């Protein structure tokens, strides 16, 4: 099938670019003697996770239970859920996946730990857990150093759990600082928090088997840092408009994801209306001041929102205005949320649609 025949709006993933990105990250982390545990939140697809595992990934990270189920039940047998679960029904669903593969999950406090341990004991299981450390993200996580180490020491003694290591994701550094040297400088104190936590653990007689963190924005800073066993980048396979502005990342990885739309109306000579609104591409980076609009891959054309199902293209001259029926491709500002709005993405090579992949949404 040719991409012209696809129903729009839809997500296209250029498989040649994607495969180059996967290889580049695999080769790079190997050269730093570090593992890669790619984050599936950017693709939500066992089809892509399999390519990452085949390229040598030590496992796959997921951010939701549904993503974890999609991976484990489709042959991806090493999954770390980088979130906490605190609903008995969801914990049960998570634990039921143990028979299909190696699953790990985060804990960061007595409540979520006890809930998980109780359910594991009830099933006669020992579940692998990583203690989440707040190295700067200021979301979940124990404070680094002694507080995280003391908590880990307690976790290691809770029946029903296996303490495996530390989750140290520095989400605050991925996209906020486009300049590489600035990002690297800011990463220094963050990475020292990891070292301090490992040292505090050793004082308590614990050796973490896994110390994982790092994303696309810090992949070439965190990979190879002493004590870090693997990094967990997600967006590098797809890339997006914001990441293309992040120094080194933007030049290291190719743009694999586009959103395809159709021009449905041309009300005047410098305006065209397309079938791609907020329900097909997220614009939330606008709130962070990073620019949330998708970038049109047509010269002289800019996107502005027309609401849920419409997009309005402003064209700098009549000669640049696309016509009714034309297809227009966009680079989304944020690949993760763009994909999450679609039930399927199309893997393409050139203009040929090679595969349609379901997206494991919530
Ligand atoms: C816990 C965790 N790890 C890894 C990532 C991957 O980040 P990126 O897509 O910036 O590589 C994310 C992204 O939000 C995350 O939340």
Image (cartoon, grey):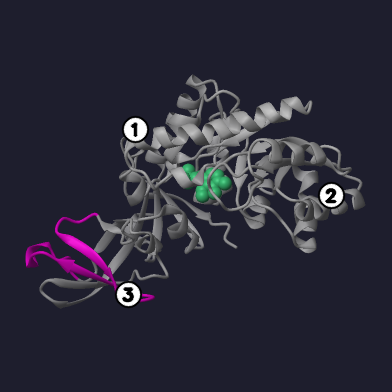
Q: Which residue is mark 2?
A: 117
Q: Is residue 152 left or right of residue 303?
A: right
Q: Residue at x 62, y 52 (%)?
A: 140
Q: Is residue 340 above or below residue 241?
A: below
Tell me if mark 3 has few (under 14), some (14-19) or many (20+) residues whose alpha carbon lies within 10 angstroms of its own: some
Residue 6 drawn at (x, y percent): 38, 62
Residue 203 drawn at (x, y percent): 74, 25
Magenta-tinted stretch: 297-323
Q: Which residue is mark 1?
A: 181
Q: Is residue 253 left or right of residue 225?
A: left
Tell me if mark 1 has few (under 14), some (14-19) or many (20+) residues whose alpha carbon lies within 10 angstroms of its own: few
Q: Residue at x 32, y 74 (%)?
A: 310
Q: Is residue 82 left or right of residue 123?
A: left
Callout 1: SS = helix
Q: Which mark is residue 60?
A: none
Q: Which mark is residue 310?
A: 3
Disc with the residue nearer the chain's start (1 vs 2) = 2
Callout 3: SS = loop
Q: Residue at x 73, y 43 (%)?
A: 103
Q: Nearer the viewer, mark 2 or mark 3?
A: 2
Q: Examine the rendering and report whether any part of residue 22 can be seen.
A: no
């Amino acid at each position: 099938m040719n991409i012209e025949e696809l129903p729009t709006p839809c997500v296209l993933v250029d498989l040649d670019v994607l495969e180059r990105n996967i290889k580049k990250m695999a080769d790079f982390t190997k050269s730093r003697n570090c593992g890669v545990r790619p984050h599936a939140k950017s693709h939500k697809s066992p089809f892509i996770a399999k390519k990452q595992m085949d390229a040598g990934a030590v496992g796959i990270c997921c951010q939701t239970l549904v993503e974890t189920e999609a991976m484990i039940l489709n042959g991806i047998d090493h999954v770390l859920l980088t979130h906490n679960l605190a609903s008995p029904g969801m914990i049960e669903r998570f634990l039921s996946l143990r028979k299909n593969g190696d699953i790990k999950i985060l804990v960061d406090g007595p409540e979520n730990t006890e809930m998980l341990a109780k359910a594991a004991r009830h099933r006669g299981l020992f579940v692998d857990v990583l203690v989440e450390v707040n190295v700067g993200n200021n979301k979940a996580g124990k404070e680094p150093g002694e507080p995280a180490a003391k908590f880990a020491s307690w976790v290691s003694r809770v029946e029903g759990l296996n303490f495996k290591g530390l989750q140290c994701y520095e989400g605050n550094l991925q996209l906020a600082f486009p300049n590489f040297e600035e990002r690297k400088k800011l990463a220094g104190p963050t990475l020292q928090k990891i070292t301090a936590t490992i040292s505090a653990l050793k004082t308590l007689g614990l050796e973490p088997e896994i110390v994982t963190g790092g994303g696309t924005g810090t992949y070439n800073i965190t990979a190879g840092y002493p004590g870090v066993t693997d990094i967990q980048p997600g967006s590098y396979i797809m890339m997006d408009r914001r990441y293309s502005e992040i120094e080194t990342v933007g030049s290291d990885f190719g743009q694999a994801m586009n959103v395809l739309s159709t021009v449905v109306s041309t009300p005047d000579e410098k305006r065209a209306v397309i079938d791609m609104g907020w329900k097909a591409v997220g614009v939330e980076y606008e709130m962070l001041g990073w620019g949330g609009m998708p970038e049109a891959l047509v010269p002289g054309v800019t996107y502005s929102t027309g609401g849920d199902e419409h997009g309005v293209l402003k064209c700098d001259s009549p000669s640049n205005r696309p016509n009714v029926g034309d297809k227009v491709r966009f680079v989304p500002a944020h690949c993760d949320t763009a994909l999450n709005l679609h039930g399927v993405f199309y893997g393409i090579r050139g203009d040929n649609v090679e595969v349609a992949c379901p997206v494991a949404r919530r």
